[in-house]
Amino acid sequence: MVEQWLASVEQAMYDAVKHHLKLGLSDIKTTDYSNWILQHPGQVVLTISQVLYTRQVNEKLDSQSNENDAGLIEIRDQMIITINNVCALVFTNVEQSKLLTVEALLTLQVHWRDIFDMLIKTHTRDRNDFEWQKHLRYDWSDKETNFQILQCDASFPYGYEYLGCSSRLVVTPLTDRCYLTLTGAIKLNLGGAPSGPAGTGKTETVKDLSKSFGKLCLVFNCSDELDHKTLGKMFSGLAQSGSWCCFD
C-alpha cells in the first residue's frame, strides 16, 4: 500500500534526523566548533548549538554566587568571540548550503548574546528566574533520549521533521513575547491569532517558531470561498501528520 510505504518513509526521516542530532551532540564535545559547524547538517548545527547555550546558562546560574554576575559575563564574552569566529567562516571558501547554515547560526547567536546581556542587566541568579524561563530553551533528556523545547512551565518534544537548510528570523523582544504567548496556548491545546498591520512578520514569526519546534508549518491563504469541507480536509491532514498550519 502506498500509505504504508509513505508512513515508512516518514518514520525513516524522523529516525535519520534524530540520529544526526544525537551524533552532533556527541561530536561537539570533541571537535573544534568551527569545524563542527561544517561537518554537520544545518538543522543539527542550529538545534545542538542552542542546547549548548541553554546548558551553559543553567550551569553558570547554578554555580555562580549571589554577589556577582561573573559566570554570565564569562559566557557572554565567550559568545562574542564565537560570533567573530563564525563570521570569519563567511569569508572562507565554503559551499552554499554551509553558508546558509552559518548565516542562520549567526542570527541565533546574536539573539543569544542579547539574552546573556539581559540576564546580566537584570542580575539573574537562579535558573527558575522568569527573566531566563521566558525564553525558548533547548535540552536533551538522557532518560527519555529526546530533545525538549522549554519555555516557562511548558515543555514540548522536538518534532524531528527534516526542514533542510533555511534562514532564521531575527528575534526581537516583541518576537519573544509572541513566542511566549503561542507556546502557552499550545500547552493548553489552543491556537494563536497574531494581529497587526500587514508586513510586520506575523506569518514569519509562526513559521520560525515551527522551525524551532522541528515541525512542518503549512501556510494556507484564506479567501471568501473557503468552506467547512475544505477546512475539514485541512484539519484531517494536520491531525494525521502532526504538522502546524498558519491560516493567513
Image (tube, helix red, strand yellow):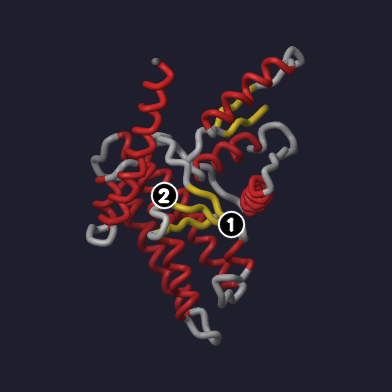
Q: Residue furthest top?
A: 225
Asked if one can make out residue 174 in the rendered structure from this viewpoint, the answer is no
* Quadrant where the C terminus is found in the figure: top right
The residue at 54%/34% (across/down) is: 242
Asked if one can make out residue 161 in the rendered structure from this viewpoint, the answer is yes
- Tell me the tag on residue 151: 1
Q: Could you tell which of marks 2 and 1 lies nearer the N-terminus?
A: 2
Q: Dot 2: what SS?
A: helix
In the image, residue 58 sits, relative to residue 147, either above or below, namely below
In the image, residue 236 sits, relative to residue 136, either above or below, namely above
The residue at 62%/60% (across/down) is: 153
The residue at 54%/28% (across/down) is: 240
Where is residue 136, by image quadrant?
A: bottom right
Kindly identify the amino acid type of the residue bearing the numbered disc 1: Gln
| Circle count | 2
Task: Residue under label 2, please give it.
Answer: 47
Residue 246: image location, x then y, percent: 63, 31
Q: Nearer the viewer, residue 199 or 163?
A: 163
Residue 218: image location, x then y, percent: 56, 28
Residue 70: image location, x then y, percent: 46, 80
In the figure, is residue 96 to the left or right of 238? left
Q: Dot 1: what SS?
A: strand
